[in-house]
Amino acid sequence: MKKIAVSLGLLSAIGFNAQSVKTQIDLVNVKDDKVNVSLEFPKMKSGDVKFHFPKTVPGTYSTDDYGRFIEGIKFLDNKGKELKFTKVNDNSYTLKNAQNLTKVTYLVNDSFDDEMDSSKHKAVFSPSGTDIEEGKVYLVNTHGFVGYIENMQDVPYQLIVKKPKDFYGTTALVDQDKSDDTDTFTLANYAKLTDSPLMYTKPDYVTFNAGGMELVLGVYSPTGKYKAADFKENLEKMVIAQKKFLGDMNTNKKYAIMLYLAGADGPQIKGFGALEHHESTSVVLPEMMPKEAIDQTITDVVSHEFFHTVNPLKVHSEEIHYFDYADPKMSQHLWMYEGGTEYFANLFQIQEGLITRDEFLKRMNDKITNSKNYNDTMPFTVMSKNILKDEYKDQYRNVYEKGALLAMCLDIELRKLSNGEMGYRDMIRKLSHRFGENKPFKDDKLIDELVEVTGYPQVRDFYNKYIAGSEPTPYEKYLSQVGVELKKQDTPPIFWFVKDPNQTGYNDKNNTFIFDESSALSPFAKSVGFKITDEVVALDGKTINIQNIQEFINYAKSVKDGQNVTLTVLRNKDGKSEKIDLKGKAILDKMTIESLGFKANTTAAEKKLQDQWITGKK
């Protein structure tokens, strides 16, 4: 997708003309949780028209087919007459001889209500999804509401949101009218439109200045348990630390955070997390989380999204710059876009004094452990390029584990090559200055650019071996160079449902144990046909209650090898939860615990490199 070379300020000054797409989203006249959207187009240059909704959007790396949430679509000519069309698939429509097409109208269903029914489609990741709850909240990820005509993505958009008078829209966009009934925004093109989410709810927001950047945090808490002001102190501390860490790499003047806290009585959301944009992030978390846990998640997850303002939003390949929403072509470099960003989200915390050295090592150790749940010999570039294909998509979560570790090892490698003068952050800074938001690099030439900006040919060897190659990364070798060692300790055999019991979560609505889909099943779970999406209800009739959870855990610990056990689970079948019993003999699983620690006896060279790595100082 080519971006037009005209500033938003100029567009605002001259106003929109007949060459703009006037888009209206009506949040007032909502019926059956459906929102009416209309688009008015400039005169068609061609008689044949293709109209699309996104199949995939930047930052998600999954096929979501947003067109499946659309119904009642109508294509109208300049006299209001309906034009004939052909529906090609969920996302695409074609019209023949449609020179007079001037308007499209349709209804939008939200994706949140669809999350529990995964019988037909994989659920949309909540932060990139849509929520329509009349009188409560509207999460408007614009890519889920607005379609586009092929070859007209570069036409400016005027977005008009018709809203309840007492609702406030959290967004990084600037409202251009003073009405209480509507918000009007100016967007340079379709890419900028989809890059600009909004959340409308009763006003609950805080603003503050962080290093010259205006930040707005809007919160939706269905029970009123939390207010935006509750998170201001932690958020302000985090953003100021991030701005200091990034220095001149971040040039944002405004940044918006939309924090949607999901309650027990609303949509049954499963995909907690966040999605990045140039000037904002949409965040979805459970309202039941304690404040301290939300604060920590903001520090870990929202910081990750904010670091995306540099990479890939300002450092990216042509596949991202000219993103094809209807038929996306993926980049090879998730190791840098997601892995490097995740590394930043942890590195800045140690370098800016938010966590201790031991805490930082524990985080890296956890990533080494988690990465072992994935194929360690699959080239990251191949996985990344093919991430939308079935045979690769299950490896995606490894970008946050091994991807971050690759950035860590490259950081250490650069420190050693430069005698501590250059690290991974310096490399990304140079890369961002070389390219920037409006200048992409060629996907297969990134390694040439990295060698150019660092000045070290050895970076090519690292890339060819561990990123583009199939050779497992020798973490112990690199960590040893900075005075860190990997210690191993066997634990007594235990009985549980996933290999790492720490990857167990709790569903307070069903009083069940749940597990991340990236968790590895225990030998027992595999033997009885347990699925990672199952929810554990009971073991031998002993149910789970958060108030006395230890009783359940103690019983599980008492289970002997070979003992007959009955595991009761909730399993989703055709969109409905069904309770079933899984019976078998217990298998106790021995674990080897690995932990990173600083060497007792480090050399002077190791200690110097360690300090430069940990502190970021030369």
Image (cartoon, helix red, strand yellow):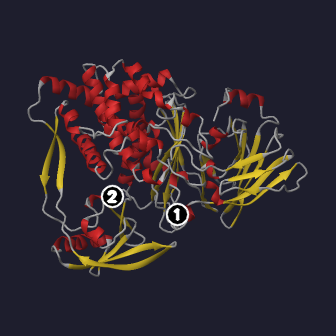
Q: Label 1, on which residue?
A: 115
Question: From the image, which quarter does the N terminus lie in?
Answer: top right
* Residue 582, image quadrant: bottom left
Vertical position of residue 615 compared to residue 305: above or below: above
Q: Which residue shows up at 37% across the image and 57% down it?
A: 290
Q: Badge 1: how crowded within 10 Å, few (<14), some, or many (20+)?
A: many
Which of discs 2 and 1 lies nearer the camera? The answer is 2
Q: Secondary structure at mark 1?
A: loop
Q: Label 2, on which residue?
A: 519
Vertical position of residue 559 compared to residue 472: above or below: below
Question: Does the image show residue 201?
Answer: no
Q: Residue furthest top?
A: 455
Q: Which residue shows up at 32% across the image and 73% down it?
A: 545
Q: Which residue shows up at 19% across the image and 71% down it?
A: 554
Question: From the image, which quarter does the C terminus lie in?
Answer: top left
Vertical position of residue 372 compared to residue 439: above or below: below
The amino acid type found where label 1 is placed reads: Glu
